[in-house]
Amino acid sequence: MSTPRLSIVTPCLNRAATIGAAIGSVLAQGHDAVEHIVVDGLSTDGTAEVLARHPHLTVIREKDRNLYDALNKGIAAARAPVIGLLNSDDLYAPGAFAAAEAALAGTGAEMVLGAAEFFTEREGREVVLKRLSGAANALSVDNAIGGITTMNAAFFRRPLLDRLGARGGAGPFDIRFPLAADKDFWLRLALLGPRCATLDATVIRYRSHEGSLTFAAGDLRDKLSRHLLDLARTRLGESAAGTAERATYRRWHAWAAGYRAALQARAGALPAALATAGAAFAADPLWPARFLARLPGHWRGRAQRRDGAV
């Protein structure tokens, strides 16, 4: 194939049950110049056999440090000027590629962002849970801090991802944050303020299933809240005093501290909640005020997302 116009990068580890459908959703676009790169972290469940049935794929099969390391590898290997990111358990909606290319061509935007649909399977049937578009899944600081980030509903021009570059220059995702680098990616992207075209059309369909980070619950939610607080504290420490970036990371740190303390308190772990709150004072003595100031916007965002429920 000649140089593709569009590269799709899919990180994968032990997804034999869903990777075939993800690949099929790319093929179903009928795009004449797309490359699909799958970065498989040495799956052992039959994923390799599924991938072997699709010789059109570019497969990078090697050990990686985490999901975001795999994404960086795939992005580095991509040859197209426009890049999309597809999880191995999700699907592109019909017509997504054509709509994205038309929006990019017509606006000169650096990225395009469409709507995101969330679905599950019950008794062999797909059931749509919600659909988010507009402000509910926009590229914004508020969505990065406490909302839902739908980076898979976006397509990015390569220079934008290069400009974003994470710490150490290994790619746009910072692999120091193994559960939360997508939030970090979205916030740094929002701070860059790229020209972003928006689509009313659904671009991505997120699959709800046990083990999905998109639908974190229970122990996974607790673990994710800890990672988000560690990330916010790290970024706050790295940001320069007096900058807009530092002000943003103060907001994020305050929200992450309050959210984690609240989760711990609701779980009956009051000493742990008090320890979380106390440790947050060392990074920012005013964090409770910043947390409370963000609550009205958080509830408005929740209402927007709830209105997207089907």
Image (spheres, rainbow, N blue to C red):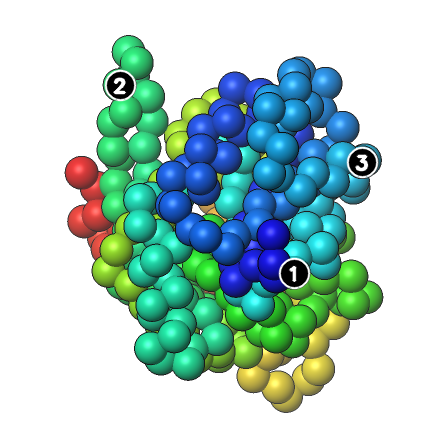
Residue at x-position 65% and y-position 19%: 49
User: Mark 1 highlights which residue?
Assistant: 79
User: Mark 3 highlights which residue?
Assistant: 62
Amino acid carrying mark 3 in the image: Glu
Query: Which percent across, then down, holds residue 204?
Result: 38, 46
Residue at x-position 80% and y-position 36%: 62
- Mark 2 and mark 3 lie on one chain; the one further toward the N terminus is 3
Amino acid carrying mark 2 in the image: Arg
Count of labels in the image: 3
* Residue 170 visible at all: yes
* Residue 284 visible at all: no
Please state if 48 lies on the left or on the right of 53 as rendered: right
Please state if 300 lies on the left or on the right of 193 as rendered: left
Q: Hey, which residue is sitting farthest bottom in the picture?
A: 242
The Cα–Cα distance between marks 2 and 3, rounded to whole angstroms, is 35 Å
Rendered-image quadrant of the C terminus: top left
Residue at x-position 56% and y-position 55%: 7
User: Mark 2 highlights which residue?
Assistant: 125
Query: Which percent across, then down, holds residue 139?
Result: 42, 67
Please state if 74 lies on the left or on the right of 99 as rendered: right
Within-10-Å neighbours for mark 1: few <14, some 14–19, many 20+: some
